[in-house]
Amino acid sequence: MTDKGLYVGLMSGTSMDALDAVLVRFTDTLPSLVANYSCSIPESLRQRLRDVCRFRHDHLDECARLDGDFGRFQASVVTQLLQVSETPPEAICAIGSHGQTVRHLPDANPPYSIQIGDPALLAVTTGIDVVADFRRQDIAAGGQGAPLVPAFHAAFWRTSNENRVLLNLGGISNITILPKDPAKAVTGLDCGPANTLLDNWIRKNLGLLLDEGGRWAAGGHILDGLLKQMMSDPYFERPLPKSTGTEYFNLDWLDAQLRTCASRDAHPADIQATICALTVESVARAIEQFAPETRTVYVCGGGALNDHLIEVLRSRMKPTRLETTSVLGLDPHWVEATAFAWLARENLQGRPGNLPSVTGASKALILGGLYRGRIAGP
């Protein structure tokens, strides 16, 4: 059944650079992007989020304040999105809010994943129903709670014409494997670090939020010994299902790699070049191991705008073709936010949003909790 209603999707990734918002309408064949809006996370809020993610100021009252503050920030971004698109709140079926991940530890005992951004506050402030907290249902069923976007990829972009991989280059890189054989299951995984290390390293050394176009990395030289040391991390050899986050791949992890390889005195640009090579190599090896028949890789996420990263990846992946999701009809910057708008729609229509073949959950489940922002009519 085609749902002609409008949905809002909100996504802020592990890089914590901005909150992306989309206004989208879904058809049977393609999500139609009506409007989009991206707002940088204020530096004071970003720093508090980073502190919590790095296990600093890890107090219940600070986490509660952050939950509310990020919820208010989300509400302001939704308001801006509706204003620029001249869309009244009552035209929106629901907001799909991923929230900001501050912990993702699916292999802990007990496993858990925490996203903040108070959905009740968001619903009440905007007057729009909100679906949020998508990951815990999957974890409760024994899954990793991630990656969740593969279900969206499969719904719109699986085809019998070719074996495809959808590659998201966010803070963490992840792939969705879409076999052309309908008898084969869709699978996926988090490959390893992407923008999270690249952004944090340039911020530490140059005070910049990101390596625009990968120009700093392009000016460095790959340190083969360091790359080999980083690729020897046990995560890269773990079997499926697997997911990861900044709790694992962070500057402390990088510093340990530099100490082990005696590379702490290397030129920072060379280390940036090597981090870029790590992203490329971890992605390429995952595709070679789990999807060797891949014909085309379609890239989305912030890393799709990193010209140097894409150039190195394209060279490494030959003869596999590399494209962005633009050729599939959706700008790579807005794919994840659109996916969470779709997950909100699946929740409202009572359909599962996870793929057990990806996450390892024991069964398919309706994901997320519903927070009412409006009173139902008679």
Image: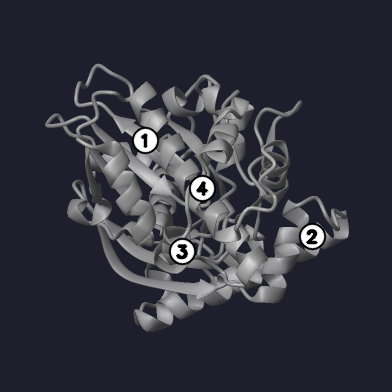
* Circle 2 or circle 1, nearest the eye: 1
Mark 2, secondary structure of its residue: helix
Real-space Cα distance between discs 3 and 2? 33 Å
Q: Is residue 231 above or below residue 96?
A: above
What residue did someone put label 4 on? Answer: 274
Residue found 39% across the figure and 65% down from its top: 213
Residue found 41% across the figure and 53% down from its top: 336
Is residue 366 at least partly visible in the picture?
A: no
* Circle 1 or circle 3, nearest the eye: 1
Real-space Cα distance between discs 2 and 1? 34 Å
* Circle 4 or circle 3, nearest the eye: 4
Q: Residue furthest top?
A: 183
Residue found 67% across the figure and 40% down from its top: 257
What residue did someone put label 3 on? Answer: 377
Query: For this rendering, which residue is in front, 98 or 317?
Result: 317
The image quarter containing residue 306 is bottom left
Residue 318 placement, left or right of 117 = left
Query: For this rendering, which residue is in front, 152 or 263?
Result: 263
Mark 3, secondary structure of its residue: loop
What residue did someone put label 1 on? Answer: 176
Real-space Cα distance between discs 1 and 3? 40 Å
**What amino acid is found at the position of numbered circle 1 in the picture?**
Thr
Whole-percent x and y of residue 113? Answer: 66, 41
Residue 348: assigned label: none
Q: Where the N terminus falls, by quadrant?
A: top left
What residue did someone put label 2 on? Answer: 64
**What amino acid is found at the position of numbered circle 3 in the picture?**
Gly
